[in-house]
Image (tube, grey):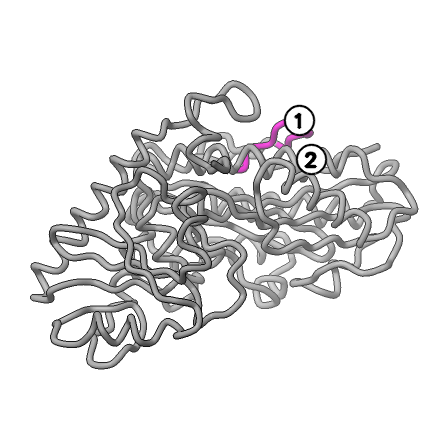
């Protein structure tokens, strides 16, 4: 039988000495989420819930992912009643999904033959039943927005997995930053970073490698054949356990010039302000306003308008982008990513909102730190690694 994520975290230790949750915890987490769905079905008065969105699939299986399926119309799904839960899958994928993704989690199987397609099975489930769904299917009540809000809250099991993912991301981006060489192209560095992630079972979702201040011109970038001469900014989003985390680190060959230093210090001040404001019941509009004031104080207020400042993350890389009009309160156990850009500088990491304050997910592992005091409290942000 193939190794799955549950096997990998069975009483094992991830990078460092952090102990990861055991498979029994994952089963308990799935059972608890089924209980939440049961209460939702009772509330809305529906017989069952059909799940076809990959983010909800991952949420309700506590980290299962449908790797290797290319056709959207062949993607697996889930079906929940108050008393049972089923995997909906093609006969091509069902055995692998049980072996690698949902083994021992209490799911039964409703299978369609590949040559008939998914639609007959879906139509059969819908026929004669009063169902809710996360996509538009027949007469099903669409509750995608409701589920999207529900899945933002991380359970204890989710948080344990998130901390493990954060270590993997931090280790990968920092190791790539410590070992990249002058003359390496952005593509080569992206390949090195991807290898480090995949080696530990994390899937690269987005990579931005910016050589020699190219990030000054592209606030959302990728990677090209441009070689690194004096500096490099690495930003990565990766997925494992069905969760996404993002981090950035900056490398300079020799002391950075005055402009790069000023821009990086400014980005750290703004990002630290956002982190300091990441408490339960905080209002995104007010947090973004406080960031804008810092931009203004450092004479870089135009930067605030050039790129998104942050978002709720989780099962999707971006669950909810913070906008100035947003009044919905931040909630405990949400994961947020703050992504501040000033000129060529980027200061980006993922955090968990808790009742005790923000907790870093992508904590710097072996990297110089910049310490910033805000209202009497100290916050640390990754500084520039000078090589």
Where residue 206 sits: x, y (%)?
62, 56
Q: Residue at x 34, y 50 (%)?
A: 59
Expressed as whole percent of the image width and height from the top left, the position of residue 25 reads 30, 31
Which residues are the magenta region? 362-370
Q: Secondary structure at mark 1?
A: loop
Instruction: State the image coordinates of residue 28 (x, y, percent, origin top left).
Output: 25, 35
Q: Which mark is residue 73?
A: none
Label 1: few (<14), some (14–19) or many (≥20) C-alpha neighbours in 10 Å: few
Q: Residue at x 36, y 55 (%)?
A: 57
Distance between the alpha carbons at the discs numbered 1 and 2: 7 Å
The C terminus - image quarter: top right
Magenta stretch, main secondary structure, is loop
Identify the residue position indicated by label 2 in the image: 174
Q: What residue is shown with label 1?
A: 366
Q: Residue at x 28, y 36 (%)?
A: 27
Front residue of 208/14: it is 14
Res 320 quadrant in image = bottom left
Label 2: state its secondary structure: helix
| Left or right of 222 in this view: 245 | left
Q: Residue 338, image x and y in percent?
A: 51, 50
Residue at the image position 63 percent from the left and 49 percent from the top: 236
Q: Which residue, as the protein is rendered here, is positioned at the far bottom?
A: 138
């Amino acid at each position: 039988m193939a190794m799955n994520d549950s096997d990998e975290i069975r009483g094992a230790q991830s990078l460092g000495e952090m102990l990861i949750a055991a498979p029994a915890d994952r089963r308990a987490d799935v059972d608890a989420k089924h209980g939440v769905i049961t209460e939702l079905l009772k509330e809305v008065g529906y017989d069952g819930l059909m799940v076809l969105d990959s983010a909800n699939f991952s949420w309700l299986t506590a980290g299962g992912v449908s790797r290797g399926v290319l056709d959207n119309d062949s993607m697996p799904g889930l079906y929940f009643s108050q008393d049972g839960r089923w995997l909906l899958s093609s006969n091509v994928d069902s055995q692998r999904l049980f072996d690698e993704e949902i083994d021992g989690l209490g799911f039964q199987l409703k299978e369609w033959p590949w040559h008939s397609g998914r639609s007959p099975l879906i139509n059969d489930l819908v026929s004669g039943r009063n169902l809710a769904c996360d996509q538009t299917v027949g007469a099903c009540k669409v509750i995608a927005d409701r589920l999207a809000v529900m899945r933002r809250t991380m359970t204890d099991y989710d948080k344990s997995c998130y901390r493990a993912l954060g270590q993997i991301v931090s280790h990968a981006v920092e190791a790539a930053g410590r070992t990249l060489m002058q003359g390496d192209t952005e593509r080569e560095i992206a390949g090195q970073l991807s290898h480090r992630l995949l080696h530990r079972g994390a899937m690269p979702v987005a990579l931005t490698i910016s050589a020699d201040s190219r990030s000054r011109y592209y606030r959302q970038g990728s990677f090209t054949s441009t070689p690194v001469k004096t500096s490099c900014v690495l930003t990565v989003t990766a997925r494992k356990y069905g969760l996404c985390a993002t981090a950035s680190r900056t490398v300079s060959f020799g002391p950075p010039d005055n402009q790069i230093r000023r821009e990086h210090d400014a980005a750290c001040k703004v990002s630290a302000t956002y982190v300091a404001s990441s408490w339960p019941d905080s209002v995104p509009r007010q947090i973004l306003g406080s960031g804008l004031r810092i931009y203004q104080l450092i004479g870089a207020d135009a930067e605030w308008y050039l790129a998104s400042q942050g978002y709720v993350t989780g099962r999707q890389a971006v669950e909810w982008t913070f906008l100035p009009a947003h009044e919905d309160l931040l909630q405990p156990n949400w994961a947020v990513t703050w992504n501040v850009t000033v000129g060529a500088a980027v200061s980006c990491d993922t955090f968990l909102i808790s009742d005790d304050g923000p907790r870093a997910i992508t904590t710097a592992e072996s990297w110089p730190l910049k310490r910033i005091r805000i209202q009497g409290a100290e916050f640390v942000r990754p500084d520039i690694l000078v090589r």
